[in-house]
Amino acid sequence: MLEISELSAGYEGIPALRAVDFKVGDRARVAVLGPNGAGKTTLLKTISGVVAPDCGTMRLEGEDLGKLASHRRVEAGLVHVPQGRMIFASMTVADNLRLGSHRAAARDRHDERRELVLELFPALGGMLRRDGGALSGGQQQMLAIARGVMACPRLLMLDEPSMGLAPRASEEIFEGIARLSESETTAMIVVEQRAHEALEICERAYVLESGEVVLEAAAKTLLSDERLAATYLGSEI
């Protein structure tokens, strides 16, 4: 589905990604792991068009993403749920969800998609008329992911979905993502500091360090091989 070759990108001449090769298969779930500053967020921003690449190619089902503006990438089925939730605080939960279904492929499926996201995150069901800003941090993160799912993505990218959340809220987030992976055929990229949780819901993993891919492996391999996990992920597993 997504094929990236020799991708490099940075900020004001400072490299953040260095010749990254990366692949997500059809319906696959891929974790991107590594320490802070490794380039994980930059990778997602470059794929979605927020950051311009310095060189390399990115193709979504054969289509050159480099030739598409960010909003065209969304229409192509690429949906990015960034760090920091970024919901519309003054709008209701229901209206935030409605905004997620603006993509052409989702406009006629609003009710169906809303039913799905409320199954993924039941806590939102009784809050549809509540302003997004009145939700807890965990509930806002649920809403951010739910809004992305409303768009009927072909590839959903989640950047640090558990960042800043209490353990119970993080658990609910990962439970919802797991339910999504079981009920949908959407491919996913999950950037996450909680490596164990990410590996539990993904099939493959890439580990980044200093903007470079230092390891690509099956998720179950990293979960079962303590030596490998200790070498590349330290105490994160």
Image (cartoon, rainbow, N blue to C red):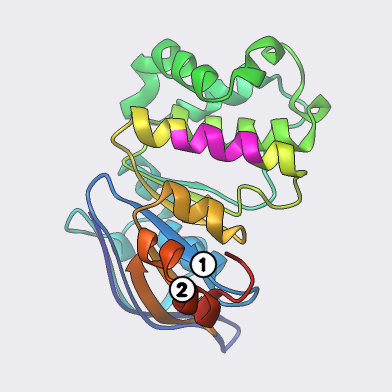
- The segment highlighted magenta reads 171-178
Badge 2 amino acid? Val
Please give the residue where the numbered disc 2 appears in the rendered image.
207
Classify 228 as above or below 186: below
Where the C terminus falls, by quadrant?
bottom right
Q: Any mark on residue 33, and which? A: 1
> Are the residues flagged by discs 1 and 2 in contact, CB closer than 8 Å?
yes
Where the N terminus falls, by quadrant?
bottom left
In the foreground, 53 or 18: 18
- Residue 173 among magenta residues: yes
Location of residue 172 (image quadrant): top right
Q: Any mark on residue 49, and which? A: none
Q: Residue at x 61, y 54 (%)?
A: 160
Q: Residue at x 58, y 24 (%)?
A: 121
| Residue 133, image x, y percentages | 80, 30
Within 10 Å of disc 1 (Cα), the crowding (few <14, some 14-19, many 20+) is many
Q: Residue at x 28, y 35 (%)?
A: 185
